[in-house]
Amino acid sequence: MRSLVEDLRRAGAIRSAAWAQAFAKVPRHTFVPEWYGQEADSRGITIWRRHDAADRDAWEAAVYSDQTLVTALDPETAERVDERAWTGIPTSSSTMPSLMARMLEDLGVADGHRVLEVGTGTGYNAALLCARLGDRLVHSVDVSPGLVEVARGRLASAGYRPHLAAGDGQQGFPGHPAPFDRTIATCSVPRIPAAWVEQTRPGGAILADVSLGIEGGLVRLTVDDEGRAVGRFTTTTGRFMAARSDAHAYRHPGRAPYAPRAGSRSTSLTAADIRAHYAFRLLLAFHLPGAELVYHVDDDTGALSLQLQGRDGTWARAPIADEHTTTVTYGGSADLWRRAEAAWQWWDDHGRPAQDRFGYAREADGHHYAWHIPDGRHRWPLEP
């Protein structure tokens, strides 16, 4: 545990004595007695193999390493492969400690602050908050009643008793024990929910992962007296599992069928450009709300491509094998990739700004938008 704290300090993830003390005090192994490692079977299908203290040295090394550990699978999709392995979709994890530390530092808590955590998960992050602020000031909610009860027991065994509740965290903490000085979410949301703004006091802050389709990121927002939440994307990067309204499964959004292939042409934007630059992918999400970025495997040749796809079935893809190839193939309208090229040109013309040069706002009327921080003239509405 001590070596993990030192590693986090050397990496710059822990920047203050208060959080160093909290990480040194809270035993992560209490909250991760078992976890699932990702493997692939002979068919290339992802399986999740359970690891626990039966091999104590390997288990403890993993628990006190700087890695995210999957701790629960969706029971609706989980299928047992052998005695210790399953297929399925992960629904809970113990986040990479360096990301947790950076977020907690970015949260900017002070003694006496009341904090709402959305996404109790294993309970480890709630324990860190308790170690820093005291049990009575920490409220944590998770959509899974089972996870909440397990976390409650683990927290109690470590000496912590925060306020815990089961429910849809996108609706805030049940019973509205507002206002909170800080709200932190360890799940991603497509938009900052109104309840988080309503339950955070004016002058308080919200730190959360906003998922915008193509890309997303961590935003730190300040709530004002008019019910607005305004801030920027942080220098800390990291992504979380999507928030769920149902305790057992993720919603599977319907998509239009792919449009027929319409043609190909040369392009100034390659797959390598998109893959190499996180800040550009974020900007691309502003320009193409509702679009997604996926990997596509050709049924006939097995060739891998990076594909943009719109809600209406339009798509455009560039090859991965030779990422510097300047040819794009598209289906439906050719406009999808043209807009991506225009975003690349804008980003290049403006000095390739990093993600923290982009702001994010949720207006009191529910409208969301991003903007370029230096002048605010460039704004991009963010649709749900």
Image: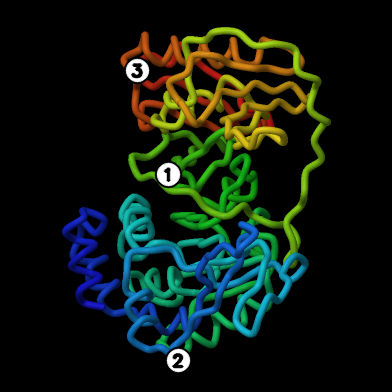
Badge 2: few (under 14), some or many (20 or more) residues near its Cα, within 10 Å? Answer: few
Identify the element where label 2 is drawn. helix
| Residue 213 seen from this side | no
Q: Nearer the viewer, mark 1 or mark 3?
A: 3
Query: Which residue is found at the position 31% from the left and 64% from the top?
Result: 111
Q: Nearer the viewer, mark 1 or mark 2?
A: 2
Which amino acid type corresponds to the residue marked 2 in the rendered image? Ala
x and y percentages locating residue 43 in the rendered image:
65, 59
| Residue behind mark 1 | 203
CA separation in Å, label 2 and label 3: 55 Å
CA separation in Å, label 1 and label 2: 48 Å
| Residue behind mark 3 | 374
Mark sitting earlier along the chain (1/3): 1
Residue 72 left/right relative to 205: right
Query: Which residue is found at the position 80% from the left and 22% from the top?
Result: 259
x and y percentages locating residue 120 in the rendered image:
54, 68
Badge 1: few (under 14), some or many (20 or more) residues near its Cα, within 10 Å? Answer: few
Which amino acid type corresponds to the residue marked 1 in the rendered image? Gly
Which amino acid type corresponds to the residue marked 3 in the rendered image? Pro
Query: Which residue is found at the position 35% from the left and 45% from the top?
Result: 236
| Residue behind mark 2 | 54
Identify the element where label 1 is drawn. strand
Give the vertical position of 246 relative to 291 (above or below). Answer: below
Give the vertical position of 161 relative to 140 (above or below). Answer: below
CB within 8 Å, label 1 to label 3: no
Query: Which residue is found at the position 54% from the left and 26% from the top?
Result: 319
Identify the element where label 3 is drawn. loop
Residue 88 left/right relative to 21: right
